[in-house]
Image (tube, rainbow, N blue to C red):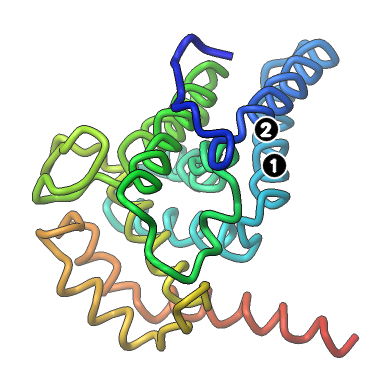
Amino acid sequence: MNGYMYRDRSDIIRLENLTTLETKIRQIRSLHTEKSIQENEIIDLCVEALSAHGKDQNQIRQTSQISRILGESLGLGMKYCSRLEQAARIYDIGNIIICSDVYEKDEKLSFEEFEIVKEHTRAGYDILIAQNFLTTDIAAVISAEHHEWWNGGGYPRCLKEKQIDISAAIVAVADTVGALYRERPGRKAWEYKKILDYIKTRSKIQFNPDVVEVFLINQKIIGEILRTDLEAIENKWYE
């Protein structure tokens, strides 16, 4: 575990989850000497950890697929976008230190609770940057910056405009779309048209306008990604 001191709130912070993940990562590194295998195994482990903590597997897939589409539309290059797609699966790994009950509350978080939840960005960065792979390096930056806003109103560092890495700007849009499209405690799922309007109105406030532009250009295929995955889930109930 790194030397960062997380807040002493055992009712919210779950450092044992971080310890367990780090132990499993060390096991992977001891079992495999080839770097590419280590990288793939660690990425899969992080996805499993997120899923076990309550992250919707379809949202993980949707966020990663949408991120790749947006990256390619921005001309970022095929190799980079391939890594971006994988990084978008695991950037939120810092959430495993936050008690899942916090995210399931119907009522709004208290000021103190929200301040503690913010620490997931630091936790995710520390976990990912320590792996020293190209994909996890991208994921680390996304973890640190995906809650930054174009106008400087985000957290944790109040970055703004082009100070925010393009990978984080892309995933911020992709994850918001996936999150709004599904039901959450205290909120019903949004219709896709409402999501489109919301993303458009948040351009130059929360979201990078270049990312919003390519999102709107690709709205048809992104809508298909959202609908296809949800239909696949629903069909399983009838098997």
Q: Residue at x 61, y 35 (%)?
A: 14
x and y, in percent, of residue 232 in the image: 71, 79
Q: Quadrant of residue 68?
A: bottom left
Quadrant in which the C terminus appears: bottom right
- Check disc 2 and give the amino acid type: Asn
**Which residue is labeled 1 in the image?**
49
CB under 8 Å between callouts 1 and 2?
A: yes
- 177 relative position to 209: left or right: right
x and y, in percent, of residue 25 in the image: 72, 21
Q: Residue at x 48, y 71 (%)?
A: 106
Tell me how far mark 1 sits from mark 2, CA to CA: 9 Å
Q: Quadrant of residue 112?
A: top left
**Relative to 96, does residue 51 appear above or below in the rendering?**
below
Mark 1 and mark 2 lie on one chain; the one further toward the N terminus is 2
Q: Which mark is residue 92?
A: none
Q: Which mark is residue 17?
A: 2
x and y, in percent, of residue 201 in the image: 15, 74
Dot 1: element? helix
Quadrant in which the N terminus appears: top right
Mark 2, Cα crowd under 10 Å, few <14 / some 14-19 / many 20+, is: some
> Which is closer to the viewer, label 1 or label 2?
2
